[in-house]
Image (cartoon, helix red, strand yellow):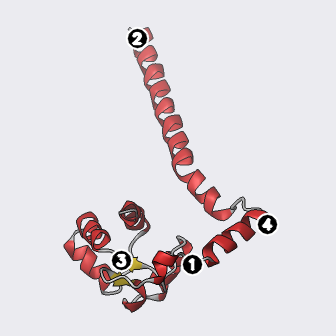
Amino acid sequence: MKKFILGGLIGMLGALMCVVIVWWYLQRSLYAPAVDELSSPSVTSSTTAEIVTSTTTVPTQAATPTTSGVPVRDLPLTTEQRQAAEALGFDVEQMVLSPALITCARETLGESRYQAVLAGDTPTLLETARLLPCVGR
């Protein structure tokens, strides 16, 4: 009888250790790559020159004013919102929010949270990540 109790306790301890190891591994693999990619970008000077050249070249379609959408520069952005957009690589002065993007943001955040963000509340990191797929629309 003592052998069964001792064997059961050892088995439960082993299972607990497995759960802790899997949890630790998932925490490191889910969060570590995103932080490493943001903190140490691997951009060489030649790719930097290519990026500067490609971003300074203005396409002919972008030169024509768009009639649909809301220009971001006209929105009352807080400094945190402006910094977050620029950190993600968006040019706040030239970006236009399309009707599809606005609809997607409303559906993703919900109407009350969407209105709070429009009023000047900064989206959380999780909300920003949830909104990124809307940018491609």
- Which mark identifies residue 58? 1
Q: Name the N-terminal-most of marks 2 and 1.
A: 2
Q: CA distance from mark 4 to mark 1?
A: 22 Å
Kindly give the residue lying farthest to the left in the view shown. Answer: 111
* Disc nearest the viewer among 4 and 1: 1
Q: Quadrant of the C terminus?
A: bottom left
Q: Is residue 75 left or right of residue 83?
A: left
Residue at the image point whose x is 40% and y is 11% from the top = 4
- Which mark identifies residue 24? none
Whether pointer 2 and pointer 4 mark residues with C-beta atoms closer than 8 Å, the reply is no
Circle 4 sits on which residue? Answer: 45
Residue at the image point whose x is 55% and y is 45% from the top = 29
Kind of residue sitting beneath label 4: Ser
Q: Name the N-terminal-most of marks 3 and 2.
A: 2
Q: CA distance from mark 3 to mark 4?
A: 32 Å
Residue at the image point whose x is 78% and y is 64% from the top = 46
Residue 104 in the image: state x and y as whole percent: 28, 66
Circle 3 sits on which residue? Answer: 97
Q: Is residue 50 left or right of residue 91?
A: right
Residue 18 in the image: state x and y as whole percent: 50, 30
Kind of residue sitting beneath label 1: Val
- Which mark identifies residue 4? 2
* Disc nearest the viewer among 2 and 4: 4
Report helix, strand or loop for mark 1.
loop
Q: CA distance from mark 2 to mark 4?
A: 66 Å
